[in-house]
Each structure stands twice: as C-alpha cells, then as structure tokens.
Image (tube, rainbow, N blue to C red):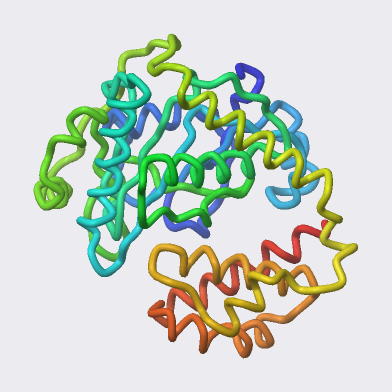
Amino acid sequence: MTEFERGVIVRGGPFSQRKVCTWRKAFDTYLSGAAASDGEAYLSMFTYPADFLLHVKTSGFKGWHGPVSAEYVCLDFDNEAEPTAAIGNAQKLLCWLEGTAAADLSRVIACFSGGKGAHVYLPASAFVLAPGPLFPKTCKAFALLLAKEAGLEHLDTGIYDAARLFRLPNTRHAKTGLLKLPFDGESFARLEPSTIIDMAREERRDALPIDDDSAWCDWTLQDIWNRAAAYVSKLASTTPPASDKTDLNRATLEFIQDGARNGERHNRLFQAAANLGEFGASERLARALLVEAARDSGLPVSEIETTIKAGIRHGEHSHE
C-alpha cells in the first residue's frame, strides 16, 4: 500500500482549508501528542495515490472516484445519550478480538471520541487488501459483519465514504472541550468507561504503537474481510448506476414512514438524504420529507440539519 501515501488534513473546524499531506506522518504526529496544538484537526480516513494530487490541482477536493486504501480500518461507536455505553461496545470489540482472533491489542488504537462515543483503529497490516473505488464500501460491510460476529451495538456506519474526514487523536472536541484521547487497545479495554472520560479532561498522551508491519491477529478478520469484499463486489455488479435508478431506495421510504432506532438513526438519515440527492431533490424538499421522522427517532434538530445537508451533497456528487 506504499503507493497510497497521500491524505487530506484540515487544521481547525471541518470546513477550514484542506491540504494534501503524507497521511502516516500527520497521523503519527497527532497520535504521539507531538502536534503543535490540541485544537480541532481532521484527517481523511482513507489514503490516496499519487494521481489524487493531480486531481486536487485540477478539480479541487471533490469528485474523486479513483482508488483509495487505508492504514487502519476504523469503527465508530456512538451513543449521544450514554457515551459510556458506546465506549463499552468498543471494549467488547477489543475483548472479542483478543479472545476470538488472537489479537495483540497493543497494536490496536482505541480512542474516546471526546463527544458521544469511541473509535477503534484496526491496523491494515492484518489484512490482504485490494485498494480501489469500492474500498470504502468494503470497510463498511466489514464493520457490519464484525459487529454482528461480536454482538456489538451503537455502530455508526455513516463514516465510510471516500472523502470522509475523521477527527485526529489528541485534539479537543469543539463542543465538549474533551480530548479525543488515544490508548493502545489493551489499556483501553481494561479501564472503566467513566475513567476514560475523566482522563479526556486532562493532557494529551502518546499512544504511538511499536512500528511493526507483521500480522497482529490470526486469519479470522481476513475471513470476515473476504466475505465483505465478495458481497460488495457482487452488489456493484448487479446494482444500476444512480443515474439509471427510477425509484427511491426502499430504506428511504421506510425511514420517511417509520424513522430509525437508536444506533442507526444518523446513518439512516444520511442515506435517505443522499438517495433523495441522487434524484435532484433540494435541501428544502429533503427537510420536508425527513425532518419529522428524524425528530421522532430522537435526533436533535441541529444534527438533523447538518446530516441532511451532507447527505444531499453526497447524493448530488454521485453524478459527478
């Protein structure tokens, strides 16, 4: 994966200036706590090849449909009402990895998000990966399969798109002021969730793992990855392009009618808005169709507005 070295970094709020960077150098600087500031900063979840730089110079940061890869496969657990429950699910995943996949948790990175949940970074060295345009969809399918295998809840699957920015470790959440505090997986799994949150009020910490590209777990995760990749490949070969669709997705219609349960609300709202965006729906129309169901599902109004806006934009870009 050495070809896929580029990343996109944003220092400041998520709408601040984007710059192309060397992904690994940027991530490690923040993970070790050596960045110049602990203020807001974001890094692309995925990595890009050399051609991405040319694309940015000619077309900007939008509309990249080429291959992507990753240094880590990430899972995001969110529970706004009870962040400790989301942390608990991240810990449950880590224990499952150790007990079922013979994982060396000292090589895994786990973070309290600083807000409503936890992020787990699985080193890509565990997998035989095939970078490509479908790579983000494979990551999503892998996360869903892994959550099913390990019996996990509160998984946010709305994070897997090629342009996704993910807040960097050792930076402070804009609303709570708490750090996205990183740990090695072994330490994170054995701390009380409330203790992890209390520690996020303190100073940055160095969670840089030992630089080692050797396998850190057995073949269990590769088997799950292979099943996810096969599913995504099959789906891609049988699903018409968005421009050829004549009907809204059933999931969109179901969301409008019934909303969604906690743990999948954000993702379902985003997907519904993106589906409407594929059909050229305006933000105004999308809000009229989706806001009531989203509010009935328990999402706050501010989050509904930003999610619908992001979903519409994502759906519109699928035609670029």
Q: Is residue 319 visible?
A: yes
Nearer to me, 46 or 155 = 155
Q: Is residue 105 above or below residue 119?
A: above
Q: Residue at x 72, y 42 (%)?
A: 56
User: Quadrant of residue 156 in the image?
Assistant: bottom left
Q: Is residue 53 visible?
A: no
Q: Is residue 182 left or right of residue 227?
A: left
Nearer to me, 246 or 207 = 246
Residue 232 is situated, as x and y percent measured from the top left of the image, at 69, 42
Q: Quadrant of the C terminus?
A: bottom right
Q: Residue at x 34, y 34 (%)?
A: 30
Q: Residue at x 43, y 79 (%)?
A: 297
Q: Quadrant of the N terminus?
A: top right
Q: Residue at x 33, y 21 (%)?
A: 103
User: Quadrant of residue 67 in the image?
Assistant: top right
Residue 44 is situated, as x and y percent measured from the top left of the image, at 53, 42
Q: Is residue 96 left or right of residue 259?
A: left
Residue 282 is situated, as x and y percent measured from the top left of the image, at 72, 81
Outermost residue on the right side: it is 244
User: Quadrant of residue 8 in the image?
Assistant: top right
Q: Is residue 296 above or below residue 170?
A: below
Residue 312 is situated, as x and y percent measured from the top left of the image, at 67, 70
How many marks the image carries: the answer is 0
Nearer to me, 266 or 281 = 266
Q: Is residue 301 above or below residue 105?
A: below
Q: Is residue 252 left or right of residue 15?
A: right
Q: Is residue 196 left or right of residue 211?
A: left
Nearer to me, 11 or 75 = 75
